């Protein structure tokens, strides 16, 4: 089997490192996960797609890979999100497992499940298909009874490992397990004793006092710093990245690595640290997410799935970058289109091949499914927003107006049109938004000279637009200003007002050419 990385891309290098450190295996396990306590935002998504890109790199090397995604839905519900309804009702479930919190928004079986389903529905759109593991189900089935017993047997070892990263030592009566009360469901409990096997004695603030068998009860679980390494061993995890907070000195990854080896006799997975993601240009539309975070769904409103993948595939995980909703959207699309053109322009010159291979690999990893066999239809977002405004957001009419779109290119182009329209409507500067006047629009009050300008323009449009080149048509438009001895700084705003009711807009000559003679004459004939 070939164990050489496909390229020098960071995902390929990571895949090669996994094979080198873990050896040739029948199956590699790559992992990610999160507590479904609220919106899964783009910062969380960075971990998911970092794993997916590495999984793809392993598969491209001919390896069998399992991508597991753990929903830590047996964690404690600690805080009511600000954006949720029925705050007082939700507050009644604080300190209970998040899987028991009702969903007051969508009517799902639980608040946790509602958050899970939102992400599970979206990930296939960006080409990600993990195997989901629901930790509440695992704990409730007592699948981890032996893992918890092992933790209890190594109580002193784990306490020593955790104390190494703490400012004050854990107390002597600390236990490496936590218990939800069987009567009130809350974690307001104190572990009192353990019988050396599976029996755990605890009491609760509600007054309940009992001994439970970890093989039969759904109420006992491990705290996060012990749960994580236990699951690495249980699932045989070979790779899992983590954020800066987990990778800080003495952070959860450091202690989990020790516990995994010393307590569970399993080498910690290969990992890397990924950086934070900033968000730019959200002023035009308020996010419904708590704390102003941006979800994957909101990013998919503005970016095609391939371009979302491109943002992450083209950036090293340890580099911070921004998801932009401002004018940078134009550049991000242009950067992707340039990468795409490079992919479909493979050089014959060996000197240029190295640069091509780098861009080609980013493009391959950016695709949701198979890499296209022909060049997708490219159109700049700026021009596309003009067309969408001209046709009042009618995507089918926009595509029809282009005239040269192949049937195989329509689906992806439609997605780009929808993203461009969403961006134009919700986030773009005001000068990107306009509507074309028609015979029912309020007539512009004009002087005799201004009327003459519009009449002459109408004649030029009628006789020439669509029959000569855009450059030749532009000369004729400027000739009107020269003939009437009018500055273009006066003439152009007049034309914009007559056509779209605003003082300015897209570059005039190209704009008029895009609108076309039929629509323009209906407007100009009125003068």
Image (spheres, helix red, strand yellow):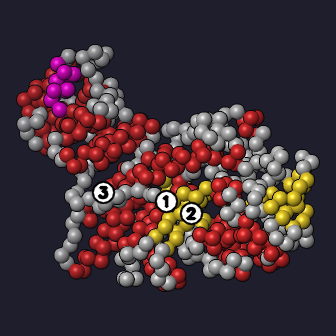
Q: Which of the two residues, 237 or 86, is positioned nearer the viewer here?
A: 237
Q: Which residue is mark 2?
A: 32
Which residue bears the numbered disc 1?
Answer: 130
Residue corresponding to mark 3:
337
Picture coordinates of residue 115, whole percent (x, y):
59, 46
**Quadrant location, the N terminus:** bottom left
Q: Secondary structure at mark 3?
A: helix
Between circles 3 and 2, the one closer to the viewer is: 2
If you read the primary sequence from the N terminus, does the residue marked by circle 2 or circle 1 appear first? 2
The C terminus lies in which quarter of the figure? Answer: top left
Q: Residues within 10 Å of mark 1 (few under 14, many from 20)?
A: many
Mark 1 residue element: loop
Tell which circle, 3 or 1, labels the residue nearer the N-terminal end: 1
Q: Are marks 2 and 1 in contact (CB under 8 Å)?
A: yes
Q: Which residues are magenta?
A: 516-525
Magenta span includes 518: yes
Q: Is residue 166 above or below residue 86?
A: below
Left or right side of 313 for 119: right
User: In the image shown, does 472 or 287 lie closer to the viewer?
Assistant: 287
Q: Residue at x 26, y 35 (%)?
A: 396
Q: Is residue 127 left or right of residue 87?
A: left
Does label 3 or label 2 sit earlier along the sequence? Answer: 2
Q: Main secondary structure of the magenta part?
A: helix
Q: Which mark is residue 364?
A: none
């Amino acid at each position: 089997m070939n164990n050489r990385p496909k390229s020098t891309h960071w995902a390929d290098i990571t895949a090669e490192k996994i094979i080198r450190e873990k050896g040739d295996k029948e199956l590699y396990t790559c992992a990610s996960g999160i507590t479904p306590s609220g919106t899964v935002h783009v910062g969380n998504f960075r971990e998911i797609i970092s794993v997916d890109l590495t999984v793809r790199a392993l598969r491209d090397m001919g390896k069998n890979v399992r991508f597991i995604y753990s929903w830590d839905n047996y964690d404690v519900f600690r805080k009511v999100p600000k954006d949720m309804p029925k705050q007082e009702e939700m507050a009644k479930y604080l300190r209970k497992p998040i899987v028991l919190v009702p969903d007051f928004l969508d009517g799902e079986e639980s608040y946790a499940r509602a958050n899970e389903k939102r992400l599970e529905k979206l990930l296939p759109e960006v080409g990600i298909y993990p195997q989901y593991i629901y930790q509440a189900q695992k704990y409730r089935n007592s699948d981890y009874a032996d893992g918890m017993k092992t933790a209890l047997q190594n109580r002193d070892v784990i306490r020593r490992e955790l104390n190494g990263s703490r400012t004050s030592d854990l107390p002597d009566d600390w236990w490496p397990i936590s218990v939800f009360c069987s009567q009130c469901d809350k974690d307001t409990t104190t572990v009192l004793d353990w019988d050396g096997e599976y029996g755990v004695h605890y009491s609760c603030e509600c007054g309940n006092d009992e001994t439970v068998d970890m093989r039969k009860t759904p109420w006992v679980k491990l705290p996060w710093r012990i749960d994580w390494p236990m699951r690495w061993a249980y699932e045989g995890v070979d790779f899992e990245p983590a954020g800066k907070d987990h990778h800080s000195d003495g952070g959860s990854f450091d202690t989990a690595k020790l516990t995994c080896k010393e307590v569970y006799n399993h080498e910690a997975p290969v990992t890397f640290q990924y950086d934070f993601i900033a968000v730019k240009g959200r002023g035009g539309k308020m996010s419904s997410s708590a704390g102003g975070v941006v979800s994957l769904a909101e990013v998919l409103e503005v970016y095609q799935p391939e371009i979302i993948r491109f943002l992450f595939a083209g950036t090293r995980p340890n580099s911070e970058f921004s998801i932009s909703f401002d004018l940078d959207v134009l550049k991000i699309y242009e950067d992707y289109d340039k990468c795409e053109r490079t992919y479909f322009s493979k050089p014959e010159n060996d000197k240029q091949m190295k640069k091509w291979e780098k861009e080609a690999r980013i493009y391959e990893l950016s695709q949701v499914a198979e890499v296209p066999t022909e060049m997708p239809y490219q159109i700049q977002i700026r021009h596309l927003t003009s067309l969408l405004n001209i046709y009042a957001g009618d995507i089918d009419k926009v595509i029809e107006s282009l005239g040269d779109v192949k049937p195989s290119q329509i689906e992806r182009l439609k997605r780009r049109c929808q993203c461009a329209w969403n961006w134009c409507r919700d986030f773009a500067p005001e000068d990107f938004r306009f509507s074309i006047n028609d015979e029912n629009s309020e007539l512009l009050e004009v002087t005799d000279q201004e009327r003459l300008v519009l009449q002459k323009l109408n004649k030029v449009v009628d006789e020439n637009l669509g029959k000569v080149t855009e450059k030749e048509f532009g000369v004729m438009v400027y000739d009107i200003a020269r003939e009437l001895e009018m500055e273009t700084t006066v003439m152009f705003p007049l034309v914009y007002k007559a056509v779209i009711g605003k003082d300015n807009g897209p570059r005039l000559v190209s704009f008029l050419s895009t609108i076309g003679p039929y629509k323009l004459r209906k407007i100009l004939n009125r003068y």
